[in-house]
Image: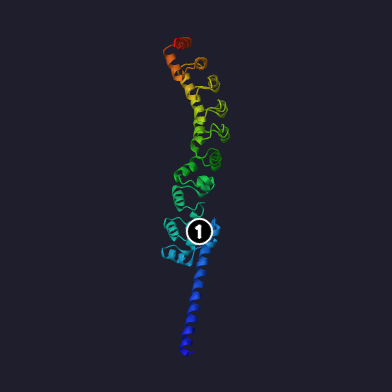
Amino acid sequence: MLLGDKLKIGAISVGFFMYSAILALNWSNTTNRDAREKMVKTVDTAVARDVVLGLSDYGREWLEERGVPRDSSDAYDTRFLGSGENLQHIEWFYGEGITPGIANRFDTPSLNSVDRLNNTGVSPEFFNALNQDIRDDDRLSAGTIYSWQENIGDTGFINELFERFGMMPFERIHKSGVDIDSVLSYDQDAYSTGENVVGAVELGLNPGVANSYPERFSGRERNGLFGGGISPELARQYDGSFSAHKIGLLHSSGVVPRVANSYVRLNEKYDTSIDAEDIVKFSKLEYTFEEVESVVRRSVLEEVVLLGKD
């Protein structure tokens, strides 16, 4: 084989070897990068993220160039870097005067939350003691949390009510002076929302009375009956076919249960459909039940007669 041919073959072999090495290196880098990214995505805790991501030398230099000393940049919890090394977050924190000592004390990964909470005056201790679902609620303003801190102060009070009723006007309950055990004593089915409990408390409707109303009535309906001067005993005297609204209408119009229930029996007997509104009209026109019954009976008899003639 000629020397020139040998040199060509040698060059080709070297080139192929180098190309293979580059491919292997690229594959290795890609594999490592993919593995690292996959690892980052599967890590949930801030501590583990610190181990996986940390703050690179480049990141420290970049922040230092923008006025963030290395001892400060390294001190921020890595949860504030987001899912990657988002250096602008740290730069923004430092520029806003939110030092690592302040930011790290708030148990939230949200920069906006830390900024709002800190500027509003919410203490990390108060915020961190709130139920996790409360802290994660983006609809909740820092002003509301600060108001709880100043006017309630007891996160245990808030958390216990939240676990039962969800978000509710905690301050109104606290201001009423009613102890939490009483608040939690309202029937769970009827008083499933905090708003209805607040309504009962502010009406002076205690759990013992509230829970005595017929089961078919909701908490809101019980509050309405109590507010209209209708006790559980009186409500039970009206026929079960009357809704809370109808009972309130009948009572406010002076129609006692005995009279109202007579019309229910009349409907059953003659297949009529006299409702609460009709009963109230009869009462205002000063028609007695006996007079109405007489008209209904005569009307039914006339229909029977007409049917007989056909």
Q: Is residue 77 visible?
A: no
Farthest residue, direction front: 310
Camera-nearest residue between 90 and 190: 190
- The residue indicated by pointer 1 is 78
Q: Residue 257's x, y, as percent?
A: 52, 17
Residue type of the residue flagged with mark 1: Thr
Quarter of the picture holding the C terminus: top left
Q: Residue 213's x, y, as percent?
A: 55, 25
Farthest residue, direction bottom: 2
Q: Is residue 88 visible?
A: yes
Q: Residue 229's x, y, as percent?
A: 49, 22
Q: Residue at x 43, y 65 (%)?
A: 62
Q: Residue 20's x, y, as percent?
A: 50, 75
In the structure shown, which secondary structural element does the residue marked by tag 1 occupy?
helix
Camera-nearest residue between 297 and 167: 297
Camera-nearest residue between 204 and 288: 288
